[in-house]
Image (cartoon, grey):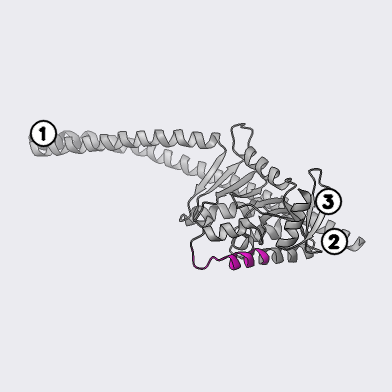
Amino acid sequence: MKVNRLSHAVRQGSVRVASRVAMVVVNTARRSADVVYHLAILGLSAGIALSLPVTAGFLARNLLYYWSRIEDEKIFLILVEIAVAVMLVLLLSSVGRSWRDRRFAKMARRAGMLSAASGGEFFARRRIRRLKERQGFGRDLMLIGSTGARTFVDPKGDLYSVLHSCREAKIMLLDPESEGARARAKAIVHPDVTEEVFREQIKKSIAFLKALKEVQKTIRLKLYADPPFLKLAILGDYISMQYYHAGMDVQMMPEYLFKHDQNPASLYTPLYQYFLARWNDPDISEYDFETDELVFRDPAGNEVKRGPFSRSGAGQANASRA
């Protein structure tokens, strides 16, 4: 027992040291990028300033000459007027669009939104995934999902590496024997998505988490019975959110990224409170990795009843609680 505690303490210390080293490296890279950016701006402005006398001399020598040749060309003047009108229209449209984009960006910042990526935006999704990997290193992970198969069981999933490097994980998945799991499986119109496949994916996710639990990872799992509503992944000061639309795969839905700040209008706080409310719901059972049982607790966190990991057991436990 002492050896296990000592190894756990050593592992936690190494995670903290590695996290600090990674933060130092990231901050150094950011400062270097800022220096290079300012040097580039300084060089560009110096080049423009040095070229102004040459440009002004060229225009002074040639402007009157070229104007004397084209001042009587009516067709050319008409073409110039049309070109100037088109440029003005494009310029005014660009200014209006820029103003509207700035207004929407201001509203997004007020709501705490940092990024939004649709299902087909590969680079935006990859940028969000890398952010999750950086923020999840040595921190706590809180997740609400449906099956977890493509989220953290698949090596290409967004949270696969995060689960291996995080400090503690609180995960909520669908109960594979619940009505919510069957309703979600039926709602997705795809020949490869059936109730049996859905149930098997959840059981594989549980087995995956159980294997991580055996290597001294601090993982807690709860299983809810109602149909999924929001997919949330909380990593430190960042929250990733997707919506489970009826009849559509969640991977095709946009993914929104929110950042925590001191702004009371930010959506980070209500989303965080939503997860805590779901996690502390006494009607949602916790899976015991050691006994393969469902544990029901009261609002204070005290154990009330245990039931087998099956539909009948869960139903009896819910009935006894009622």
Dot 3 or dot 2: first in sequence order is: 2
Query: Is 177 within the magenta?
Result: no
Position in image of residue 17 (x %, y %): 76, 53
Say what amino acid the circle numbered 2 marks: Ser
Total numbered circles = 3
Residue at 64% across / 33% down in the picture? 262
Quarter of the figure that contains the N terminus? bottom right
* Label 3 neighbour load within 10 Å: few <14, some 14-19, many 20+: few
What distance separates the C-alpha of mark 3 from that of mark 2?
Answer: 29 Å
Residue toward you, 239 or 299: 299
- C-alpha distance separating marks 1 and 2: 88 Å
Question: Going by the image, does 98 lie left or right of 144?
Answer: left
The residue nearer to you, when weighing 19 against 6, is: 6
Q: Is residue 16 left or right of residue 64?
A: right
Part of the protein shown in magenta? 190-203
Query: In this rendering, does residue 89 appear at all?
Result: yes
Residue that badge 1 annotates: 71
**Mark 2 and mark 3 in contact (Cβ < 8 Å)?**
no
Q: Which residue is mark 3?
A: 303
Give the mark nearest the N terminus, 3 or 1: 1
Query: Which residue is pictured at 51% across the width and 44% down the height?
Result: 37
Q: Nearer the viewer, mark 1 or mark 2?
A: 2
**Which amino acid lies under the numbered mark 3 shown in the image of this protein?**
Glu
